[in-house]
Image (cartoon, rainbow, N blue to C red):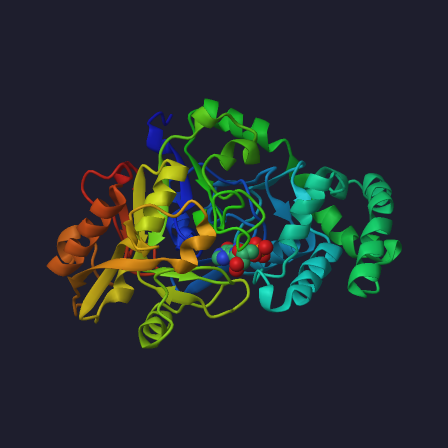
């Protein structure tokens, strides 16, 4: 029976996604009973390294790699069933038991027409595109809000699927054909394409809210796995350059059907520098040699689309904002090892904006493109960090950098990652995650 707050742990992206949440979740999942996702879909990409094996997960929580951990896909998610089935088949082919996955019947379905609409919309926008992953995420959430979405509970029941799709498809086709010059979709062909996924996923669809509440009341340890990052949140991110879901901790309640008091600690995951894929403002971006170096050393290419990530320095203003809107109680700093070899490491403590120095993000996040970072420069270090297993193993300059980061963000560092492997993780003394190992 687990009772401490840390046993109901939310793991949130504190930047623009790709912070290394997959590695952190995988590290913690070995001691978790449940890992639950509550938003997003297969726009997410988690890379998890276990020994020599590299797993790239899109829908399925990283907890699937820890045998016996119950993995839940919540009602706040959008799910592409055809892709999910492929993902499960690939995991099974590699010997991973996927029997512990359950899917909320209330989660919305991403259909082929959503993907077509997403891609056509980006082409239409041209230079003003969002830079989406092209996976149909936005149109699927839009249809949910329009009340013309298809839910997993309908998808897995052949009669309901046929009826619902017959109701929905004419309008989708009309939009595709008349607005985007797309040929549209045939009902029978679409049903045929859905059939194997519908059959495969039928036994997995359940009342996830009830399942989770039962687990919590039995004192099981739960991880809430965030996808994307705070600055990609539809409300609190750099709108319109955001994803279509709420990515902050408050979304856990609606996205899983539990009360907000069920969330204990809220761990924000942040890289020791910053990356972003897609368009939109990024004050600490380094577009020259420094950015290239971070990209090459950090292997910064999108897990879902393979796009090179934009790279820059750690932005404490962004992390401070993430701390506020998520209620962060701890920070997991990832990829610290990537900074090795730099003469100077920088972190942005504020911005110059319209002649003033500010410490918080501007009211209109679109103004971020006019913000000049105010950096604190610190001495770098030459030692490789990948073998460090405790705080004392880190060179003094790396420790000083972490302390500066902690002080500037105003949140304690609860975990440090110095490489992709589970073992390359440091739990500082006094961290509330010490009890997890
Ligand atoms: P969408 O979620 O595919 O609609 O993409 C909207 C924006 O969110 C784009 O800038 C994407 O690059 C970004 N995005 C979506 N998912 C992720 C992710 O998992 N990691 C990083 N960026 C993401």
Depth check: give the residue in front, 357 or 313: 357
Report the residue at 58% width, 44% height from top: 99
Quarter the N terminus occupies: top left
Tell whether 211 sits left or right of 229.
right
Task: Indicate whether 241 appears above or below 285.
Answer: above
Determine the image quadrant of residue 311: bottom left
Can you give x and y, in whole percent of width and height, for residue 313 in the image? 31, 62
Quarter the C terminus occupies: top left
Report the residue at 35% width, 67% height from top: 298
Report the residue at 56% width, 63% height from top: 131
Tell whether 20 sits left or right of 195.
left
Can residue 109 be seen in this snapshot? Answer: no
Can you give x and y, in whole percent of width and height, for residue 77 in the image? 60, 43
Depth check: give the residue in front, 185 or 194: 185
Tell whether 338 sits left or right of 11.
left
Can you give x and y, in whole percent of width and height, for residue 195 in the image? 79, 51
Which residue lies most toward the front here?
Answer: 355
Report the residue at 19% width, 56% height from top: 401
């Amino acid at each position: 029976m687990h009772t401490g707050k840390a046993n109901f742990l939310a793991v949130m992206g504190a930047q623009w996604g790709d912070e290394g949440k997959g590695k952190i979740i995988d590290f913690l999942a070995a001691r978790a009973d449940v890992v639950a996702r509550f938003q997003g879909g297969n726009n997410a990409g988690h890379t998890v390294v276990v020994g020599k094996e590299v797993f790239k997960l899109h829908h399925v929580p990283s907890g699937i790699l820890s045998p016996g951990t119950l993995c839940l896909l919540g009602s706040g998610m959008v799910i592409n069933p055809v892709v999910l089935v492929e993902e499960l088949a690939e995991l099974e082919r590699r010997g991973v038991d996927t029997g512990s996955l359950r899917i909320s019947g209330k989660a919305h379905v991403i259909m082929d027409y959503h993907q077509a609409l997403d891609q056509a919309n980006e082409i239409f926008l041209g230079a003003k595109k969002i830079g989406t992953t092209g996976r149909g995420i936005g149109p699927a959430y839009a249809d949910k809000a329009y009340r013309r979405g298809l839910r997993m509970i309908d998808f897995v029941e052949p009669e309901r699927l046929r009826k619902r799709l017959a109701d929905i498809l004419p309008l989708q086709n009309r939009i595709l054909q008349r607005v985007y010059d797309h040929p549209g979709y045939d009902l029978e062909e679409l049903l045929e394409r859905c059939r194997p996924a519908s059959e495969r996923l039928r036994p997995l669809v359940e009342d996830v809210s009830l399942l989770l509440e039962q687990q919590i009341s039995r004192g099981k340890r739960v991880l809430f796995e965030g996808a994307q990052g705070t600055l990609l949140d539809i409300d609190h991110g750099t709108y319109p350059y955001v994803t279509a879901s709420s990515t902050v901790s408050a979304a856990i309640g609606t996205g899983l059907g539990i009360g907000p008091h069920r969330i204990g600690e809220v761990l924000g995951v942040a890289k020791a520098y910053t990356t972003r894929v897609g368009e939109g403002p990024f004050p600490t971006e380094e577009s020259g040699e420094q950015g290239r170096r971070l990209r090459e050393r950090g292997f910064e290419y999108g897990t879902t689309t393979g796009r090179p990530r934009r790279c820059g320095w750690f932005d404490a203003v962004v992390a401070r904002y993430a701390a506020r809107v998520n209620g962060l109680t701890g920070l997991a700093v990832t990829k610290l090892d990537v900074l090795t070899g730099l003469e100077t490491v920088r972190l942005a403590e504020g911005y110059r904006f319209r002649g003033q120095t500010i410490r918080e993000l501007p009211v209109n996040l679109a103004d971020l493109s006019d913000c000049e970072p105010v950096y604190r420069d610190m001495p770098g270090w030459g030692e490789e960090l990948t073998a460090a297993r405790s705080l004392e193993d880190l060179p003094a300059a790396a420790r000083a950098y972490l302390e500066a980061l902690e002080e500037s963000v105003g949140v304690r560092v609860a975990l440090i990652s110095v490489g992709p492997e589970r073992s390359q993780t440091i739990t500082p003394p006094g961290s509330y995650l010490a009890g997890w190992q």
